[in-house]
Amino acid sequence: MVELSDGTVPAATVGRLPYYLRALRDLAAEGVALTSSTELAERSGVSSAQLRKDLSYLGSFGTRGVGYDVESLASYITVALGLETEHRLAIVGIGNLGHALANYSGYATRGFQVVALLDASPDVVGTRVAGVTVEHVRGVAEVIQRERVTMVVLALPGHVAQDVADAVVATGVREILSFAPVALQVPDDVVVRSVDVGGELQILAFHAATRAAAV
C-alpha cells in the first residue's frame, strides 16, 4: 500500500492502478513516449476526471499541454504497487482452475513468480504443472518457508478454504487471493482479495433482467 502524508491511497484507487499500468505498458510497447489523460483514461476504461483524481493521490504528474511521460509514470505506478521486487506465489488447489492459474503466462511481466503448487489429491500430488512439482497441502507451512512465498492463491472448494487459509496465515503470509465461494475469516492485518465468479455472473444477470424489464 502506498503511504501518503495524509493517509493511504483509497482502496478503489489502488484497484484501478493495475489498469493504468497495463495501459501505460501497452503505450510503451507501441513506442509512445507521451500520452494525454484522455487517451490513458480511454485505454483504462475510466473517465479523464477519475484518472486525474486517482493520480493526484500519488503525486503531481503530467504537464499541461504536453501530457504524461509514459515511462516515468509507469515506473512510478510500478513502485507504488510494490512491483519493483518480485513476489513469490503459491497456488493451493490444482484442479481445472488451479491448472489454468499455474499456466498463466503473464506473471513474469507483472512482477510475480509461481514457486509452489499444493493439493490434497493423490492423483495430483507429485505431478508437474507449469514446470513445478505439486506438493501435498499438509506441508504448506514448510513449503511456504522453503520457497519464501509472499502471496498465496486459493483455488479451493469452500468447505476446505478456511482451514487452509488459517494454515497460510499462521506462516506469516498476509496477502491472499481467494477463488473459494466463501467469506474467509482472517486477522485484521491480512488482506484477502476474493474472486467470486458465480457472484459476478449473478450481478450480470441482475443487469440483464433490469434491462429486459425496461423494454
Image (spheres, rainbow, N blue to C red):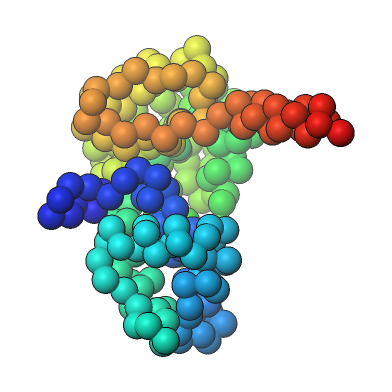
Quick check: can you spot residue 152?
A: yes
Residue 82 rendering spot, x and y as whole percentages: 28, 56
Residue positioned 27% across, 26% down in the render? 169
Residue positioned 42% across, 35% down in the render? 193
Q: Is residue 103 above or below residue 60?
A: above
Q: Is residue 124 above or below residue 38?
A: above
> Please, which residue is most extreme toward the front here?
214
Residue 145 falls in which quadrant of the image?
top left
Q: Quadrant for the C terminus, please.
A: top right
> Please, which residue is most extreme toward the top here?
159
Q: Is residue 142 above or below residue 15?
A: above
Residue positioned 42% across, 86% down in the render? 65
Q: Is residue 202 left or right of residue 42?
A: right
Number of numbered discs on residues: 0
Residue 118 falls in which quadrant of the image?
top left
Residue 76 rendering spot, x and y as whole percentages: 30, 69
Residue positioned 35% across, 43% down in the render? 11
Q: Name the residue nearer the viewer: 176 or 50.
A: 50
Q: Is residue 129 above or below residue 106?
A: above
Q: Name the residue nearer the viewer: 186 or 157.
A: 186
Residue 191 rendering spot, x and y as whole percentages: 31, 34
Q: Is residue 97 left or right of residue 171?
A: right
Residue 110 falls in which quadrant of the image?
bottom left
Quick check: can you spot residue 84?
A: no
> Please, which residue is most extreme toward the right here?
215
Q: Name the residue nearer the viewer: 116 or 211.
A: 211
Residue 178 rendering spot, x and y as whole percentages: 46, 31
